[in-house]
Image (cartoon, rainbow, N blue to C red):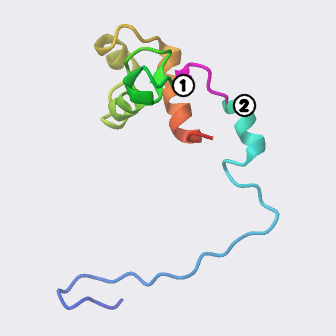
Amino acid sequence: MPKSPSGLLLAELKPRRLVENRPSVLSPASLIDMRVTRVTIDPDVMGGMPCIRGLRIPVATVVAMVADQMTSTEILAELPELEEADVTEALRYAAVGSQ
């Protein structure tokens, strides 16, 4: 494998092969079951950031807590206004994006 001037190995990247007629992981059909109902966007709440049920708790905060490896139990203890379903919805919203 080739090396850079600093001695680091350089990966040889090959073009990815696209597979025809294969549904993508997040195709519109698969998103039907991923409807988000607990995320609200209100210009008067947190400047319009996506929040949980109109509370002043941004979805990004919950997602960051999960990314920091906090469990749902730990998140609910930290943010007692939330319910288990709120954590799930925040992750679902992050997965789907703002579509």
Q: In the rendered structure, which amino acid carries the disc numbered 1?
A: Glu
> In what quadrant of the picture does the C terminus appear?
top right
Classify mark 1: residues with Cα within 10 Å, few (<14), some (14-19) or many (20+). Answer: many
Given residues 13 and 58, the one toward you in this image is 58
Classify mark 2: residues with Cα within 10 Å, few (<14), some (14-19) or many (20+). Answer: few
> In what quadrant of the picture does the N terminus appear?
bottom left
Q: Is residue 70 above or below residue 95?
A: above
Q: Is residue 27 above or below residue 14?
A: above
Q: In the rendered structure, which amino acid carries the disc numbered 2?
A: Asp
Give the residue pinned by disc 1: 89
Residue 39 among those drawn in magenta: yes
> What kind of element bears circle 1?
helix
Quarter of the rendering containing residue 93: top right
Q: Residue 72, how many percent across, how many down?
A: 40, 20
Question: Which residue is found at the position 78% from the left and 42% from the top?
Answer: 29
Left or right: where does residue 78 sit relative to residue 76?
A: left
Question: Which residue is found at the position 43% from the left and 84% from the top?
Answer: 12
Quarter of the rendering containing residue 4: bottom left
Q: Main secondary structure of the magenta part?
A: loop
Q: Residue 59, how many percent across, how many down?
A: 43, 28
Distance of label 1 from label 2 (alpha carbons): 12 Å
**Could you say which disc has been placed on residue 33 in the image?**
2
Q: Residue 75, how many percent across, how many down?
A: 34, 19
Left or right: where does residue 55 sit relative to residue 30?
A: left
Q: How many marks?
A: 2
Residue range (magenta): 35-40
